[in-house]
Image: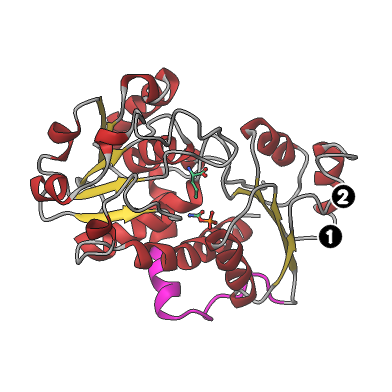
Amino acid sequence: MTRHFLKDTDLTPAEQAQVLDLAVELKAAPYSRTPLAGPQTAAVIFDKTSTRTRVSFAAGIAALGGQPLIINPGEAQLGHKESIADTAQVMSRMVSAIVWRTYAQAGLEEMAQNSSVPVINSLSDDYHPCQILADLLTIREHRGDVAGQTMTYYGDGANNMANSYVLGGVNAGMHVRIAAPADYQPAEAIIAEANELAQTTGGSVTVTDDPVAAAQGADVLVTDTWVSMGQDAAGRDDEASPFAKYQVTSELMALGNDPIFLHCLPAYRGKEVAAEVIDGPASAVFDEAENRLHAQKALMTFLLEKR
Ligand code: CP
Ligand code: NVA
């Protein structure tokens, strides 16, 4: 049966751990697995801009023995002239995987329903699950393990990163705290799904509007842009931004358990994070960026071998 990765919980906790183990293996021996040898082609479609996702998937597909086909915004018939269902049926006769960065999660679901090859969400308005795999790998490297670690996310608690931290983090047995203004907290459905998952993984999720309380004893502090792709910056990014008091500062870092700082990037210094934090010794953001490559190679290997 074809497996897809559209949201964080599409991997069970055991499978997520297996992918992270494989990522460690592939980081140490980058050319040791070649599930795309042939070379087979994997399509990487972008409806939004990207640096890390584009480069890490292109490099990762090549390292797995394959050939990346990058399709930039507006280049395919998809989105203007052709349906998602027809696109999925055509492409899955020619490529071995479809990686798609898009807006609507429903579009990814439709692509997956009509595809005979794995479909991977490389960011939607709702989730960024490949990024969380890279973050979990980075936390493992810097903290020894992921289960039992406390991770506090600051800022827009209703965006794709926040949703994926809640689900992906709890899937990994982490204690996830979301510190966000009342109007920007995760949807009830996300919290309900995480709470149910927490019963089996031992993780937890808590939501607060208190940035200081959320930092106490945390092992990881993480944030994201206040204005995600496709959002209007007005009212989110100015001096009166509702997120201003959620900037990750040295003062907040000092309240944690000698924490590391993570950020999916691109970052806006002086907005969601103080420059001295992201450019300081506790920052692991470039390890995190590199780990996109290793985590996604592991994910693709896992999905391709499941077919
Ligand atoms: N973190 C991330 O997905 O970066 P890009 O938008 O550059 O791909
Ligand atoms: N929340 C951000 C993440 C970018 C990698 C966005 O969607 O723009």
Q: Residues within 10 Å of mark 2 (few under 14, many from 20)?
A: few
Based on the displayed image, in which of its 4 quarters is residue 71 positioned? bottom right
In the rendering, which numbered label is found on residue 90? Answer: 2
Q: Is residue 41 magenta?
A: no
Residue 85 spot, x, y in % from top left: 82, 37
Identity, as a three-letter code, of the amino acid under mark 1: Met
Q: Is residue 304 above or below residue 48?
A: below
Q: Which of 165/14 is in front?
A: 165
Measuring 66% from the left and 55% from the top, which residue is drawn there? 307
* Res 78 quadrant in image: top right
CB within 8 Å, label 1 to label 2: yes
Q: What is the secondary structure assignment of the residue under circle 2?
A: helix
Q: Which residue is tagged 1?
A: 94
- Give left or right: position of 277 versus 69: left
For this rendering, which residue is in front, 68 or 254?
254
* SS type, badge 1: loop
Position above or below: 246 against 269: above
Q: Which residues are magenta?
A: 21-37
Give the numbered dot on residue 283: none
Indicate the position of residue 98 as horizontal and vertical percent values: 70, 53
Count of number-bearing discs: 2
Q: How is the image coloured?
A: secondary structure
Left or right placement of residue 181 versus residue 302 in this view: left
- Residue 177 visible, this angle: no
- Name which residue type carries label 2: Val
Viewer-closest of 36 and 82:
82
